Amino acid sequence: MTEALLRAVRFPRPEIPVDAVVRAVIASRAIAPAVTERMVAGAVELDRFQDHPALHTEGNTLQAMEVRASTRSGLSATGAGGWSSRDSAGYSRADSFRSDKAMALLRDRLFIGGRWVAPAGSGLIEVIDPSDGSAYARIPEGTPADAETAIAAAREAFDAWSRTPPAERAGYIGRIAEGVERRSDELAQTIAHEVGMPRKMAARLQVGGPVASWRHYAKLAREFVWEERVGHSLVVREPIGVVSAITPWNFPLNQITLKVAPALAAGCTVVLKPSEVAPVNAFILAEVIEEAGLPAGVFNLVTGYGPVVGEVLARDPRVDMVSFTGSTRAGRRVAELAAATVKKVALELGGKSAAVILDDADLAAAVKGTVSSCLLNSGQTCSAHTRMLVPRAKLEEAARLAAEAVSAFKVGPALAEGSRLGPLVSEAQRDRVVGYIRRGLEEGGRLVAGGPDAAPEGKGFFVAPTVLMVDDPKATVAQEEIFGPVLVILPHDGDEDAIAIANDTIYGLAGAVWAGSDEHALAVARRIRAGQVDVNGAPWNPLAPFGGYRQSGLGRENGDYGLEEFLEYKAIQLRSA
């Protein structure tokens, strides 16, 4: 009878009462994950099931139950005396019915060759919720063998996929876009847990952007000019081959999308290694891709650490291109490994972007806009405008305006109502940022707002939005990427001095110019050595190329430019008629 009732949870039947289902769950200490969003066992509402008194007696608290609609579930032993429930997507939650602490989401399989497969090793990586420091999830600690298996699958799939007509590839990408949109609420919630960005903002930026990008590349695959006549030559654009995509944690789904979507549109096959800090969204995307029916091996997901999995993906000779987003130091290592086989490398790395405020600018608007850019995602944005260059005579007024602007950013947990600034992603990141603030003060900086000890109390990894006034543009906090909610105000003595200070870093990712007219701002913007420069608060353009000069990277993402990164040019010389 118990087995029959458990089957009823997987395949709901309205005639089975909730009491019977609850008793079956407790008796077996197992529950399949195929519980619909609104019902358990047919006509039973989910909250009635979760709140059933029998589940909250001593030793029987139902913990970490995940709502899922899949009916492809199965039960498997955990080896620890209890059970875990698993669907074909490698999803499971161990239900030990402990009353002390909810157990973390467990994703224990990798997506390789069109199937969810057990990893070669048994290690797990813990994913921490930065809002409270608790374990949010556990994922496979992939091995070199896992990476090699995924590369082999992508290599095998490449020939057929590269010859698939672009319109057909576009159909798959369009279905992926629809799947991501259907699961947008789940993805926003997941990324809020992983990264700490407030939930509403995560829905708009972390998920809304990727949905639009998937749609764009579906459209572009149909419309792109894949070949053209140039004199007596036929110039064709062909996929570069097998692509290793290694992505960061700060905008996880967005950076995955800006690599995987154009690569698939180009006809490449992909092995994705997401950041182990924020990987769960990648598993959801893999489920969407599986449901879209993408041929086996075209997309593969391997999780793990960079020095283990990432290095294999960068150096393996069967990989034709590596697309990496992350720190400049890690980017150098990727380029070094890839150089041995002379494969193409695209790098989107760090930044220390300057917002140049000229003497005739609207100072209040410029300061407010710069603060908003600096604090996006708690400052964990590579293109954030973290240096604000102000005419020396206006320093005090700018400092006052900056202090007022940061005071509007309420710091709090990602899922708390009213939070505008979430935590930093990890304890190590928080400590690193606080260390930079202290160093800035030690080197003579003046504290305008926030500070190393101003964070709110709580278990999360919070740093108060901080403004430092620094006179020396060579100071550590004015040169190194802090990657936290820290704005550095620097004085300048006119346009030429401001341009020199703005360009005096190893980076060149982004920047801004504020002036009394767009013409004045544009003239200065043309001289800023950076891949993207905003004029007088102009909005983000997802169709424009994004990437950096110097040690901010190589190559471009977004729009048509992002697709072209994954293409090779071939000239076929034809005989004259």
Image (spheres, helix red, strand yellow):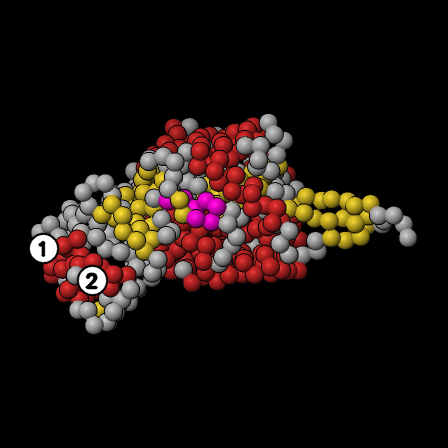
Residue 414, visible in the rendered structure:
no
Q: Is residue 165 above or below residue 324?
A: below
**What residue do we see at 51% from left, 61% from top?**
175
Report the magenta residues as a range: 109-115
Which labelled disc corresponds to residue 5? 2
Query: What residue lies at 74% left-to-right and 44% top-to-bottom?
Result: 570
Q: Residue at x 48, y 40 (%)?
A: 150
Identified by mark 1, the residue type is: Thr
Indicate which label's residue lies in the foreground, 1 or 2. 2
Q: Residue at x 18, y 42 (%)?
A: 81
Instruction: Please say whether residue 138 is one of the residues in the magenta stretch.
Output: no
Using a 10 Å C-alpha cutoff, classify the residue at mark 2 as few (fewer than 14 neighbours), some (14 to 19) or many (20 or more): many
Residue closest to the eye, 44 or 522: 44
Element class at badge 1: loop
Residue 553 pos. (x, y %): 57, 37
- Amino acid type, callout 2: Leu
Q: Which mark is residue 57?
A: 1
* Residue 110 on the magenta span: yes
- Whichever of labels 1 and 2 marks the residue nearer the N terminus, that label is 2
Q: Position of residue 136 (x, y in %)?
A: 29, 46
Place of residue 576 in the rendered image (x, y in percent of width and height, measured from the top left) = 90, 50
Q: Nearer the viewer, residue 475 or 258?
A: 258
